Amino acid sequence: MVRHTSLLISTFAGKLRGSGDITTNRVCNHTKAPYRIGSLVSVCDHFYTVAQTGEPQCYELATGEEVWKQEKLPRVETYGSMVHADGRLYVISTRGDAFVFTASPKYELLATNSLDEGTTASMAVSGGELFLRTARTLWCISEKK
């Protein structure tokens, strides 16, 4: 039996340059941030993330200051990372609901789409196409060619 007496929850961002002790390269370290499994995504001067329980957030890259945090999205639990493509941020829930946001310091939910099939993986982006893997299907979403 494993017992946990404490849990450190953190959102960490650091500069990419450096060698040796790089602790001074830290941009932010939020130790009371919501639990996350996925990675942060950086776009221009901001980085974005979503908690496992569905709270999307935006932070200023230079300071680590929170720009926006939204209430929990409906029907959301996610194990994947947010991804960025063409000025938009995408995240998919374990129920197969895909949420599309603007990659902007102003919060804007553009769309919610449902696959009616569960997923546990992040979306992938390649060649202008979005790939989603569900329990039974591999989806490719792209503009009509």
Image (cartoon, rainbow, N blue to C red):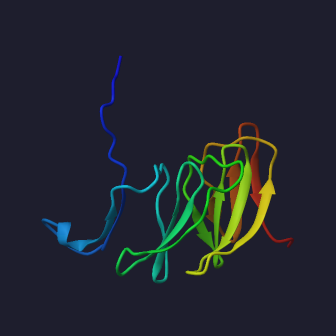
Q: Furthest residue to the front?
A: 71
**Residue depicted at x 64% and y 79%:** 87
Q: Furthest residue to the top?
A: 1
Total numbered badges shown on the rendered structure = 0
Q: Position of residue 136 (x, y in %)?
A: 76, 37
Task: Look at the picture and state if 59 lies above or below 52.
Answer: below
In the image, is 141 to the left or to the right of 124?
Answer: right
Between 143 and 6, the residue placed more toward the observer is 6
**Residue depicted at x 46% and y 53%:** 34
In the image, is 24 to the left or to the right of 131?
Answer: left
Image quadrant where residue 85 sits? bottom right
Q: Furthest residue to the left?
A: 20
Q: Which quadrant of the figure contains the N terminus?
A: top left
In the image, is 37 to the left or to the right of 123?
Answer: left
Between 18 and 42, the residue placed more toward the observer is 42
**Residue depicted at x 42% and y 57%:** 33
Q: Position of residue 49 (x, y in %)?
A: 51, 63
**Residue depicted at x 66% and y 77%:** 86
Image quadrant where residue 70 sits? bottom right
Q: Position of residue 77 (x, y in %)?
A: 62, 46
